[in-house]
Image (cartoon, rainbow, N blue to C red):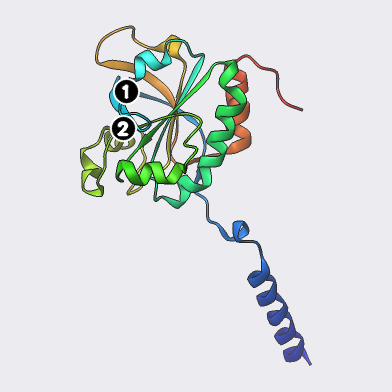
Amino acid sequence: MNKLISLLAAIILAGFVASAPAHAQVSHEYAPLQEKEFSYNDWKYKSLKDNSPVDLRQFAQDKKLVLVVYFAPWCPNWKNEAPFVAKLSEKYRKDGLGIIGVSEYASRDDAQKFFGTTGPNFVVVSESESRDDREKTGHFGYRQKTGDMRKWGSPYNILFLPTTENPSGEVLLTKAWIANGELVETDAEKFIREKLGLPAEK
């Protein structure tokens, strides 16, 4: 009798797993925001949209808070985070949040295909176009400095206040908040609202 009950339970469980929605079976790589001290340099990369140069220091000038998110278009964890980043851009752009994505380890064409015909609702640039470039990128170096030992490090999030920028020179910042993985959505949004001077959401 016990064996029959166990068998029935196993069949029911198997049916539940098979019928579960796809998103319920997606694995995540969440990481908390942590303040880190490290030298983060200004950079200038070409826009995914029109190939024009984008300088990070200039981009940040009229913002209250900046999120730089490094990603590989083929990365499943970036695919998890991308809708949340787009939501943040839509929701907080008018309040002073600037988001800039840095595509890594894939061609510009692949990055453009990821965002589809409408494109992203935030600025995206390209730093590298080949997986062979992994250890040559600024992205890889910053991850090493901030304790991110993942092989590819996608996504890798940096949040900073432009008021803490060095006004000139190679080094842009010496301190920022880092998430070595997907942003924890409730915590990240609470942090962003605080830094933008917005009241907590109910």
What residue is shown at x 60% (from left), y 37% (from top)?
Answer: 185
Please identify the quarter of the rendering in which residue 41 is found.
Answer: top left
Of helix, strand and loop, which one carries label 1?
strand
Asked whether the beta carbons under mark 1 and mark 2 sit within 8 Å of each other, the answer is: yes
Q: Is residue 101 above or below residue 57?
A: below
Q: Nearer the viewer, residue 101 or 167?
A: 101
Is 103 placed above or below 63 here? Answer: below
**Which disc number belongs to residue 142?**
2
Q: Position of residue 14 (x, y in %)?
A: 66, 76
Which quarter of the image is occupied by the C terminus? Answer: top right
For mark 2, give the secondary structure. helix
Q: Is residue 45 left or right of residue 24?
A: left
Q: Position of residue 75 (x, y in %)?
A: 41, 50
User: 191 or 108: which is nearer to us?
Assistant: 108
Q: Which residue is mark 1?
A: 40
Residue 91 relative to residue 5: left or right: left
What label sits on residue 146 in the rendered view? none
Residue 106 location (% of width, % of height): 31, 46
Does residue 92 appear left or right of residue 65 in this picture? right
Type of amino acid under label 1: Tyr
Badge 2 crowding class, 10 Å Cα cut-off, few under 14, some 14 to 19, many 20 or more, is some
Q: How many marks?
A: 2
